[in-house]
Image: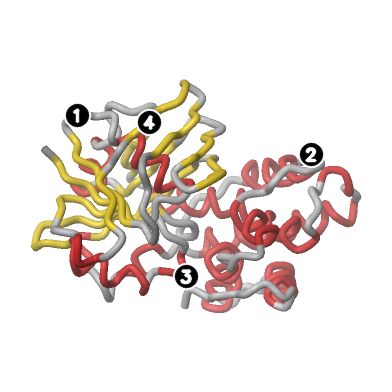
Amino acid sequence: MTHIAIVGPGAIGGTLAAWLAQDPDLSVSVCARSPLSDLMVETPQGTIRATPEVFTDPSQARPVDWVVIATKTYSADATGPWLEALCGPDTRVAIVQNGVEHARLFEHLVPAERLVPVMINLPASRSAPGRIVQSRHGIIAVPAGQNGEDFAALFAQTEIEAAAHEDFLSQLWVKLCGNCAAIVPALTLRATGPVWSSDMEAVVRALAEECAVVGRAEGAQVPQSVVETTIENMRTMKEGAIAGSIHADRLAGNPMEIDARNGVIVRLGEKHGIATPANRMLVTLLAASGTPWLPGD
């Protein structure tokens, strides 16, 4: 029996917990701020339910084989007490978060050789504690090697496609390039499609182009087609649509992952001497929007 603890059973963590709990060879627990009676996820394949053990205090936890961190990037340090309680000498920690700096945020908490960065594409939203809607098929990418392959294998009995990749860095930057333009509707509180114009296209293109250039400087392969797809997705965004978690968090008045989503493009651009004026401007404006900003660095 493989024991897994998921820290942060929100939309992503709760969905992963529910899917993993369908495998009788896995023992799944969740670490939450408040008690949960069960998990119910409406998936494209139908509704799945799970009743994992729930811990609300690190003192209740015990070492497991895998810890899955599914919190926001700005909460990395807050997971310290959970990691201390859940990690034994052989525990591996999978970091399921946005951005491209997964290991950097946790290497002071867990030995680097036991950290597994995870890229996830899993559209899901939480309507209430333990109640989640998964709108599309989920995809997970992890680095090649034993740790990554072992983590991907945990999902063999689920409908989530998980695989290890030799060029994991490119997986991260391709996703970031696709997501970076969501800062526009997060700032305007409007879907981009209904207000599309040549000027709006220029803004979105600049955001995506800057991200692609910085990613390439970091060593990632980011095809131009990714930039064009990002623009097309913004052009066809329908009225009322939510452009990812940063937009949803702004609407809810929650802290946003601005640093992980766009601030990182600015910071790493500076490292490489690459100008990123579009990302810098929108990061500055969104940070001043009145919604709390908790940077990840």
Which residue is the site of mark 2?
A: 238
Q: Distance between the residues labelled 2 and 1?
A: 41 Å
Relative to residue 38, is residue 135 drawn left or right?
Answer: right
Q: Residue 211: x and y, percent?
A: 61, 60
Front of the two marks 3 and 4: 4
On screen, 15 above or below 63?
A: above
Q: Name the residue type under label 2.
A: Lys
Front of the two marks 1 and 3: 1
Tell me if label 2 and label 1 are in contact, CB under 8 Å. Answer: no
Which residue is the site of mark 4?
A: 49
Label 1 packing within 10 angstroms: few (<14), some (14-19), many (20+): few
Which residue is the site of mark 1?
A: 24
Front of the two marks 2 and 1: 1
Earlier sequence position, callout 2 versus callout 1: 1
| Of the pair 14 and 262, the residue shown nearer to us | 14
Helix, strand, or loop for circle 3? helix
Earlier sequence position, callout 1 versus callout 3: 1
Relative to residue 139, is residue 198 drawn left or right?
Answer: right
Q: How far apart are marks 1 and 3 (CA)?
A: 33 Å
Q: Name the residue type under label 4.
A: Arg
User: Going 59% across and 53% down the picture, which residue do you hit?
Assistant: 245
Which residue is the site of mark 3?
A: 74
Q: Residue 286: x and y, percent?
A: 71, 71
Tell me if label 4 and label 1 are in contact, CB under 8 Å. Answer: no
Q: How far apart are marks 3 and 4 (CA)?
A: 29 Å
Quadrant location, the N terminus: top left
Label 4 packing within 10 angstroms: few (<14), some (14-19), many (20+): some
Q: Name the residue type under label 1.
A: Pro
User: Going 38% across and 69% down the picture, which residue do you hit?
Assistant: 76
